Amino acid sequence: METARATPAAGRASSPPSRRASGQASLYLAALRQSESDADPELAEKLCHMLLQGEEQGLKARALALLAKICNGRGRFPEALRHSKEALRLDHTLFAAHAAKVEACGGLGRWREAIRAASLCLNVMKARRNRVDTPRRGRAASLEELLGDTVDNADTPASRSILLCVRADANRRLGRLRAAVRDASAAATLCPSCAAAYAIRGEIFYQLAQWKRSAADFSIARALDRQATHGADPLSPFLPTRAMWRSR
């Protein structure tokens, strides 16, 4: 009789955390929607702070990464850097947090730190690709089910190309032109439609007085920019894009 009473009690105890996780996931998705296309970033910020009061560590990390992204968009780079670092302490594999940290470092002009952050992000993404995935159980699996397509899975050629562009531009600003050319060329190879890769490499060739190669890259960048749906690449604000080749 005592065993029979214990079983339903255990079932009732496990139900509330599941409901809480579902509610927190819904809150995160709402914050994500409000932050996209600048629908209502202030509301998104408030929702993220509400998520930080919860118990789900995976959602806390994502909320902090989203806060960092919002702060970057508003030019609040010191806050963005702090939030991204906190997110990475909770989940060092979270691409959104790495990307926000890279952007914040660039916005603050911390080029060496931006290079380190971009390199670390690329290494983390490579490790994730090489890792043999094993079935997930428990809270991690339920979190992925609740978040659906919004689970951090940004390891695409375009995202890797953008990170290489960031590193190339940071190296260019530090006078490391050979390293900058290597990164810009790798970005162009990885994602041939990335206008910024050609723009950055064109600027480097211009600094090296390699006029023909510079002109060729700027010409490609202009053509790709005209083809872009929104008129520019989805790059961080501190990265040079159209303004760079317009001055050449």
Image (cartoon, rainbow, N blue to C red):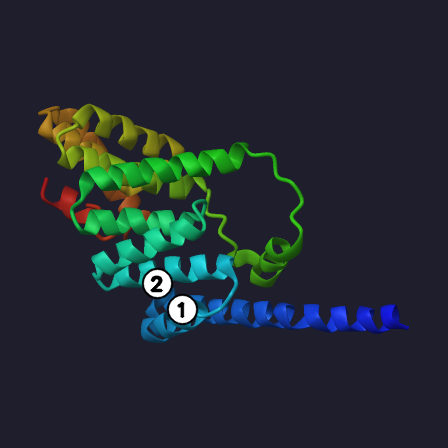
Disc number for residue 132:
none
Identify the element where label 2 is drawn. Answer: helix
Q: Give the camera-side residue of 129 and 158.
A: 129
- Tag 1 near tag 2, CB within 8 Å: yes
Gap in angstroms between the C-alphas marked 1 and 2: 7 Å
Identify the element where label 1 is drawn. Answer: helix
The residue at 25%/60% (across/down) is 79
The residue at 37%/67% (across/down) is 35
Disc number for residue 48:
1
Q: Is residue 210 left or right of residue 86?
A: left
Amino acid at pointer 2: Leu
Q: Residue furthest right?
A: 1
Amino acid at pointer 1: Cys
Q: Quadrant location of the C terminus?
A: top left
Q: Quickly name the residue at label 2.
A: 67
The residue at 16%/31% (across/down) is 204
- Rendered image quadrant of residue 78: bottom left
Q: Give the camera-side residue of 4 and 35.
A: 4
Q: Quadrant location of the N terminus?
A: bottom right
